Image (spheres, rainbow, N blue to C red):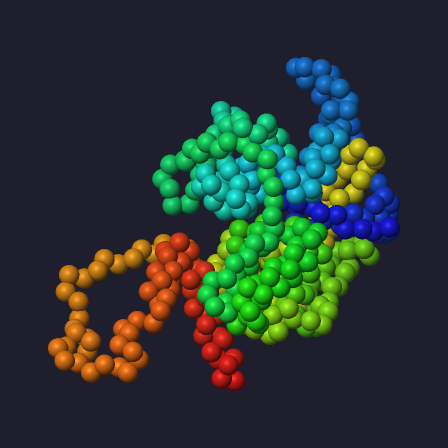
Amino acid sequence: MNRYIPALISGVVVGIGLSLGHGVLAQREATSTAVPIDELRTFTEVFARIKSDYVEEVDDKTLLENAIRGMLSGLDPHSAYLNEDEFTELQVGTSGQFGGLGIEVTMEDGFVKVVAPIDDTPAQRAGVQAGDLVIRLDDAPVKGMTLNDAVKVMRGKPGTDIELTIVRNGLDKPLKITIERAVIKVKSVKKRMLEDGFGYVRVSQFRSKTGPNLKQAISDLKKENDGPLKGLVLDLRNNPGGVLNAAVGVSDVFLEKGLVVYTEGRIDDSQMRFNAKPGDQIDGAPLVVLINGGSASASEIVAGALQDHKRGLIVGTKSFGKGSVQTILPMNSKTGIKLTTARYFTPSGRSIQAEGIEPDIILDRLKVEAAQSPVVTSVKEADLTGHLQNGNGNKSEKSGESDKKEEKVSLASKDYPLYEALNLLKGMAIQRAHGM
């Protein structure tokens, strides 16, 4: 029986995982009935030559396991063989709590590429950024390691340190960052009010309960606001993905009906379509979705669905571009393979693979600082001697207005994309209120 399992391994971006069980691939008819005799003969000859001539003796199990690894790793960056330890790590990684640095990674040109740092983890606090290339782990070069080997090195006993040597766009020389390992506890949904009527929800990863947690967060925001929201910011920046069902559930929170995502592959089980159910949790209020280069997989499903249905305004930079589905196929009770079995498509038929989601409004990463106060300020009516009072009790500023101005300046300097998202929400709310 098919079942979904969370497919977010600690430190490895799996994207979307579907457990199809034994024998599923047998459903697909072979493209050719001919046995590749010449290729198998070459494999046997190489195997025999290694056994007889390699400088050190290698057992058959190791050689065959390495052959399987090479066969899978040569397909794409996300397919892999999972030995007993790695298969156990997969199950541990789905629990939402694990030891390590707190980064989601993939392989690129033989190096470890950071898809995104996880919120509130040692890696994020140390300054690791989406897009960083890790070239050394302590004194060991990453080149030549498998992704699983690199993940094993990065994981370790909480409280121990590891030094990452990183190549980052815009820097002339590699950057060395020392990070202390810790137990990583993932909280996938966070919320807060930005201003009266305008809420903010951050989804850091997609796990099995992310959809229900998002609904609860919105319900809490409504209570805090003493009524319906005027608008909401959904923050998917640096969200590396997770479980397919969670992506569908998050999209369904804001959609009344229609297709959310569909997948296509060579086997029958990979042909799937997911539709939204009635019920918009914010009752059609304006929605702004923030994405960036660290938004991958399940994040792109949500952004693509909301964009295609014109339900939300997508703001930020182009997303990561991971539009493939990985299936966990148990080989026996202790090992398995992670195999790319399908591509997913947005409701309009767009494939995100290697393309990503293009924002409706492109907003590059910027840092804003408050301008210095001018030495000479402009003269206003209130500065003139004998000016008339305004009839509002001689109050030059409404109660709390000064505090709000300070909050706006602080938000702009701390998180400029979020500041602009809030401004967009306000404009959209005004249009909605006037029926525009």
Q: Nearer the viewer, residue 188 or 13?
A: 188
Identified at 60% across, 67% down, the residue is 306
Q: Is residue 155 visible?
A: yes
Whether residue 229 sits left or right of residue 349 in the image: it is left
Identified at 57% across, 71% down, the residue is 227
From what the image shows, is residue 84 above or below residue 243? above
| Most distant residue in the top direction | 56
Whether residue 265 sits left or right of residue 285 in the image: it is right
Q: Quadrant of residue 89?
A: top right
Place of residue 310 in the rendered image (x, y in percent of width and height, measured from the top left): 58, 73
Whether residue 68 sits left or right of residue 10 in the image: it is right
Place of residue 333 in the rendered image (x, y in percent of width and height, measured from the top left): 83, 34
Place of residue 59 in the rendered image (x, y in percent of width and height, measured from the top left): 75, 19
Identified at 81% across, 48% down, the residue is 20
Place of residue 427 in the rendered image (x, y in percent of width and height, measured from the top left): 45, 74
| Most distant residue in the front direction | 393
Q: Nearer the viewer, residue 16 or 126?
A: 126
Q: Nearer the viewer, residue 289 or 84?
A: 289
Whether residue 212 sits left or right of residue 289 in the image: it is right
Q: How many marks?
A: 0
From what the image shows, is residue 252 above or below residue 386? above
Identified at 47% across, 68% down, the residue is 196
Q: Is residue 75 visible?
A: no
| Most distant residue in the left direction | 385
